[in-house]
Image (cartoon, rainbow, N blue to C red):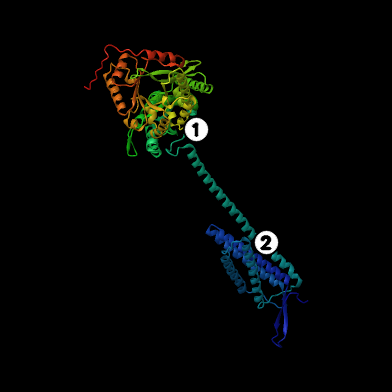
Amino acid sequence: MESPGLQLLAESAENGQLLLIGGYNPYLLFLAWLVACTACVATLNLLDRAANAEKTAARTIWRWIAVACLTIGIWAMHSICILAFDSPLDARYGVVIALGSLLIALIIVQTLDNTTAWRPNSRLLHQLFKYALCMLAAGGLLSTHLLIGNTLAGNSDAGSNNWQPGLVLAVITLLLIGSCISATIVDKKLQLKEHDLRRVNALLSQLDQARASLQQVAHYDPLTNLINRRGFNQLFAEKLIDCATRNTRLAVMFLDIDHFKRINDSLGHDAGDELLKTIATRIKLATRSHDDVVARFGGDEFCILFSLSQRDEAQGMAQRIMLKLKEPIELSGRQMVMTTSIGISVYPDDGTTSAELLKHADLALYQSKGSGRNNLNFFSPSLKTRASLELQIEEELRNALNEDKGLSLHYQPIFDLKSGRVAKLEALIRWQHPEHGLLGPDRFISIAEANGLIARLDHWVLRKACHDLAALSRLGWQHLGIAVNCSALNLVRVELADEIENALRTSGVAAHRLELEVTENALMCNLSSTSQLLRQIRALGVSLSIDDFGTGYSSLAYLKRLPLNTLKIDRTFIQDIPASSQDMEIVQAIILMAHTLHLQVVTEGVETIQQFEFLNQFGCDFIQGYLLSRPVPFEALPEILQQLDKRPVPAPDHATFVLTNQ
């Protein structure tokens, strides 16, 4: 039967004729090429795994597997080609040819290994290149066999019976090669899972670091590196549970740096931050151990939590902290000495919950600040009663302002010593409380300042005073002026000048008849902005008076800078005259200084004829006090004014005062 495939001819040595030696079955040749191509694809995948292996040993193993896979493929290809070859000649493979095929496999593996390093940008292009290379390599291997096959002779009974062993050999080879490809796929997935696991571990590590950072940010103050309020509350709850279990005591200490705002205002916030760092360090040094918790609640407020057996231990620690903070601090080239106000509450005496203990320590701190600062106080039930009362007064004062009910003005005359008649009136607020009766400003002004009501209260007084002055003008007292007090907190409001102008316009009162009284401390809180606002008010024609002079800074510098008209001497300098010669000298000096600065002088608190005569003799311009009249409601004011205008203050027979500087 004639072979249907490739025919091989040989030249007869005897007569030069061509003889048919044999031929190749094209289907088995295609199967051989397919096996070679599959072997090349598997080899490329194995080399790719070798290239991506992280360990040197793994790379070596994958390369040797690639060599074995390609060798098996080459030998299987050769065997199938032999089965495909149909010839009557008797021949066999030689050892040299077998070893040569192994050498070819090594060379091809090295070539493919070098080729896999080239990766085009396009994944599709890379796959096309890969498969094209495999088909080309398989074709080369098949061609090599055919070329070598002309020198080989095989023993074949073959014919159609070669299909069965060829297919079996091909299937076995493809299964072996497929197992290699499967191994690469499985290994790649395992490696991807390992990479994913590493990435997850890396992300978890980053998450832990981020959580730690968030924990640091959430529970620690970035400036002082102390625990913040949130972290403190968490530790506080834990320590309360521990104290309840062990039946021990726990102290809560609130600290507030006295007049810290002045540092920020004068030296800047950077200097304030440096000061807070130093204070935090000193507080930590003054505590006893690592068990004591020091926290910064915000601003210049610190809180300390510590265990104790006796209440006296808390007082001892507070005193150590106060002494430590009084040590000089170098700040912006200056030596600063800081003081602190402290409030203390103790578990379980003053409360059993963190909120209750913190509230009570805060009340004690408020008491320390209210009693002159640089002080410490323990919580007591009376503080809670006072706080409750202040809360009640705050709510009722708010209602009184909203409903314009219960508030009124009393007026105290200010007597002109030169003209001998009342020149102006000081408006003083009163509150007819439904439960506590008539309250003076000392009972509710500080509460209004602490709770944001002072601006509304001052505005009410301003409008009411201008309205009453207009009513007095219609009764015949057109020459009278009126003095209205202004809170320190109200002096920082830019709306104040517009409110004054509106009150004057609405009431029809001339601006020169209104006088605004401010205290020394109010002026010095923020002198630059205060000075600008006072100039705006002065430009309206309103007079300006400095109240309680002598109890604050008493500085000539700000008296020169501010657009003042009047200086009011505080009652503390007049109450001991004539018994105190020192007070008499001080008052005389103040009057002389004020007149030198072209300021008029009002002395308040005049209660005796001797005081009246002393002030009249040494040139005081105005007096105010119980000698003339107590503050009276508006309804009683016309009668008082008529009496004062008709009855000059009598002088004693011995109205002679001698001052010496000896």
Task: Please state if 65 lies on the left or on the right of 612 as rendered.
Answer: right
Instruction: Name the image quarter holding the C terminus.
Output: top left
Q: Amino acid at mark 1?
A: Gln
Q: Position of residue 33 (x, y in %)?
A: 68, 69
SS of the residue at dot 2?
Answer: helix
Residue 234, numbered circle: 1
When the figure is inspected, residue 224 is found, relative to residue 616, above or below; the finding is: below
Q: Residues within 10 Å of mark 2 (few under 14, many from 20)?
A: few
When the figure is inspected, residue 176 is found, relative to residue 565, above or below; the finding is: below
Marks 2/1: CA–CA distance: 66 Å
For the view shown, which residue lies furthest in the bottom direction?
15
Q: Residue at x 73, y 82 (%)?
A: 19
Q: Position of residue 223 (x, y in %)?
A: 43, 39
Q: Residue at x 64, y 71 (%)?
A: 141
Question: Camera-side residue: 396 or 502?
Answer: 502
SS of the residue at dot 1?
Answer: helix
Q: Is residue 357 visible?
A: no
Q: Position of residue 600 (x, y in %)?
A: 34, 25
Question: Camera-side residue: 521 or 504?
Answer: 504
Residue 175, numbered circle: 2
Residue 100, numbered circle: none
Instruction: Name the image quarter holding the N terminus.
Output: bottom right
Q: Amino acid at mark 2?
A: Leu
Task: Please state if 551 lies on the left or on the right of 445 as rendered.
Answer: left
Which numbered disc flags the more N-terminal residue, 2 or 1?
A: 2
Q: Is residue 561 visible?
A: yes
